[in-house]
């Protein structure tokens, strides 16, 4: 069945991916109208999230943010499809790094890097970073159920040299690279809600209190003595992005437990509040609010 679905769907994805961006964005506008006004995909979830994060806004203002978000949401989906066949040169033109020399200096200390970020703007094209740095790049990912699509997605993402590693295997990769003195960058997006059984810390995220927060980046940075870097991505205009890097710490073990996680959360909040329409609002980020176990 998985093979049949792949045979039927992939040719359409491939055909769409070879179309020029201007045509794809025209298609995106049509999909937005269907998704928002006809299908209404997760509109209640998005509005609920916005009302939790921006209680000071009028309902009309949050609805306006929601509309802008869906425009962007479909654009990112289209850009992901385009990634199947897009050239490196095209991505380099559309996804810029404002301070790439930052990593030239950081590389000299001999440590690897945990690159933290959120599902904001376009997080797929950060894969192009390895083309500009000396580090070996790794990105944690979760497998899709259809292994035919999974393999195709992997091929589309590794064209820049970045290796994709299942989240469950990332620690083994870190151990091996640490042992062999291979300086690496590990990209981890830590803004989604963790599973309750894997939750160690409850705190404030995007101004919403008592929610579970991922602590994996902090734990790994301390365990393997890695620098922690935040990527702040902005949407310059449709189809064009720029990312600026900032050092959170070069001495993770000096921080009390969860302090680095709080710093990351604050940086994400600042990013989101600046232009909220570019955050990934369709996921149920606050579904476990106030469910912290009683001590």
Image (cartoon, rainbow, N blue to C red):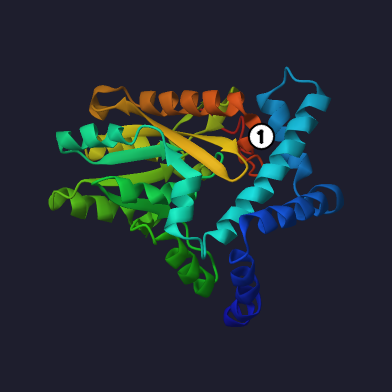
Q: Which residue shows up at 31% across the image and 46% down it?
A: 132
| Image-quadrant location for residue 67 | top right
Residue 77 x %, y %: 62, 54
Residue 234 x %, y %: 53, 34
Q: Which residue shows up at 51% across the image and 65% down it?
A: 85
Residue 153 x %, y %: 49, 65
- Residue 220 showing in the rendered view: no
Report which residue position mark 1 lands on: 277
Q: Is residue 104 above or below residue 295?
A: below
Disc 1: CA contacts within 10 A as few (<14), some (14-19) or many (>=20): many
Q: Which residue shows up at 80% across the image and 47% down it?
A: 36
Q: Residue furthest top?
A: 56
- Is 45 on the left or on the right of 103, as rendered? right
Q: Is residue 52 above or below residue 33?
A: above
- Residue 103 showing in the rendered view: yes
Front-most of residues 124 and 289 = 124
Q: Secondary structure at mark 1?
A: helix
């Amino acid at each position: 069945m998985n093979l049949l679905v792949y045979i039927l769907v992939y040719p359409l994805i491939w055909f769409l991916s070879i179309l020029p961006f201007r045509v794809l964005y025209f298609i995106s506008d049509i999909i937005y109208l269907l998704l928002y006004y006809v299908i209404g995909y997760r509109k209640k979830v998005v509005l609920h999230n916005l009302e939790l994060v921006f209680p000071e806004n009028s309902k009309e203002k949050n609805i306006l943010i929601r509309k802008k978000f869906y425009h962007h949401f479909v654009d990112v989906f289209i850009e992901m499809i385009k990634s199947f066949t897009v050239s490196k040169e095209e991505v380099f033109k559309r996804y810029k790094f404002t301070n790439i020399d930052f990593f030239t200096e950081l590389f000299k200390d001999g440590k690897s890097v945990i690159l933290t970020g959120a599902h904001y703007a376009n997080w797929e094209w950060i894969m192009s970073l390895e083309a500009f740095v000396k580090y070996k790049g790794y990105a944690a990912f979760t497998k899709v159920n259809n292994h035919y699509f999974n393999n195709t997605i992997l091929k589309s993402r590794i064209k820049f040299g970045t290796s994709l590693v299942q989240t469950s295997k990332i620690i083994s990769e870190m151990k091996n690279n640490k042992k062999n003195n291979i300086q690496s960058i590990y990209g981890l997006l830590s803004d989604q809600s963790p599973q309750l059984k894997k939750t160690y810390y409850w705190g404030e995220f995007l101004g919403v209190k008592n929610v579970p927060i991922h602590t994996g980046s902090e734990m790994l940075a301390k365990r393997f003595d890695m620098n922690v870097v935040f990527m702040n991505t902005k949407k310059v205009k449709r189809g064009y992005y720029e990312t600026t890097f900032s050092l959170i710490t070069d001495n993770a073990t000096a921080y009390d437990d969860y302090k680095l996680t709080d710093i990351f959360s604050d940086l994400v909040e600042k990013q989101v509040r600046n232009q909220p329409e570019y955050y990934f609002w369709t996921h149920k980020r606050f579904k476990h609010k106030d469910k912290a176990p009683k001590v």
